[in-house]
């Protein structure tokens, strides 16, 4: 029998083609999710930390970032967006509030707040944004279904 070694996600590193654009995009979203900027000694790196997790962005040099822009599936039958970072918040209201706050600052999601029935009496409510390199940041919550919500496709107040 093999023993497992306890671990947690310490950091995520992402190469970007334009560090200044990435700083604005990631900073706008991550600051609203409780992440703080991390001081670095290199102009090619920026970091955002919350608790024990850090997101590092680095300027790709030589330029080798070749992601395609994020493509939203046209139907539920298509594959979902697979390469993304997903941040869980406490409630659907927080998902909606974040989308509205960011839209007021000119950052529009690649899809509006979306509700999906999920396993175990939960809803999956999410929205997402993409940066200039096609990196997708999703924000989601998994609220419990109410008896009223079970009778309708979306919980009351869903957009």
Image (cartoon, grey):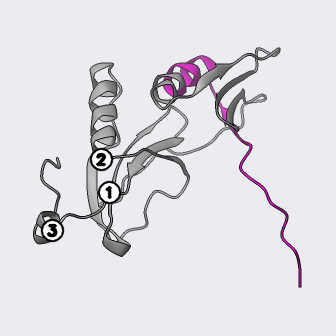
Q: Is residue 145 left or right of residue 131?
A: left
Q: Is residue 136 left or right of residue 43?
A: left
Q: Residue furthest bottom?
A: 1
The residue under label 1 is 143
Label 2, secondary structure: give it: helix
Q: Position of residue 89 (x, y in %)?
A: 43, 44
Q: Is residue 139 above or below residue 22?
A: below
Q: Position of residue 78 (x, y in %)?
A: 37, 68
Q: CA distance from mark 3 to mark 1?
A: 13 Å
- Which numbered tag is attached to residue 92? 2
Q: Position of residue 67 (x, y in %)?
A: 58, 44
Q: Which mark is first along the chain, 2 or 1?
A: 2
Q: Does residue 11 belong to the magenta stretch?
A: yes
Label 1 crowd bin: few (<14), some (14–19), many (20+), radius 10 Å:
some
Q: Is residue 136 left or right of residue 101?
A: right
The residue under label 3 is 147
Label 3 crowd bin: few (<14), some (14–19), many (20+), radius 10 Å:
few
Label 3, secondary structure: give it: helix
Q: Position of residue 94 (x, y in %)?
A: 33, 39
- Which numbered tag is attached to residue 13? none
Q: Is residue 57 above or below residue 83?
A: above
The magenta segment is 1-26
Q: CA distance from mark 1 to mark 2?
A: 7 Å
Q: CA distance from mark 3 to mark 2?
A: 17 Å
Q: Which mark is first along the chain, 2 or 3?
A: 2
Q: Does residue 36 belong to the magenta stretch?
A: no
Residue drawn 37% across and 74% down?
119
């Amino acid at each position: 029998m093999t023993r497992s070694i306890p671990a947690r996600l310490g950091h995520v590193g992402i190469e970007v083609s334009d560090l200044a654009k990435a700083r604005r995009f990631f900073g706008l979203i991550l600051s609203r999710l409780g992440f703080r900027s991390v001081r670095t000694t290199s102009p090619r790196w920026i970091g955002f930390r919350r608790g024990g997790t850090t997101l590092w962005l680095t300027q790709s040099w030589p330029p080798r970032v070749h992601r395609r822009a994020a493509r939203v599936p046209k139907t539920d039958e298509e594959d979902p967006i697979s390469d993304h970072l997903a941040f869980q918040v406490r409630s659907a209201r927080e998902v909606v509030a974040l989308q509205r706050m960011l839209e007021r600052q000119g950052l529009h999601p690649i899809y509006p707040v979306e509700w999906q029935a999920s396993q175990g009496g939960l809803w999956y409510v999410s929205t997402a944004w993409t940066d200039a390199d096609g990196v997708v940041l999703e924000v989601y919550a998994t609220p419990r279904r109410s008896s009223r919500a079970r009778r309708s496709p979306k919980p009351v107040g869903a957009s």
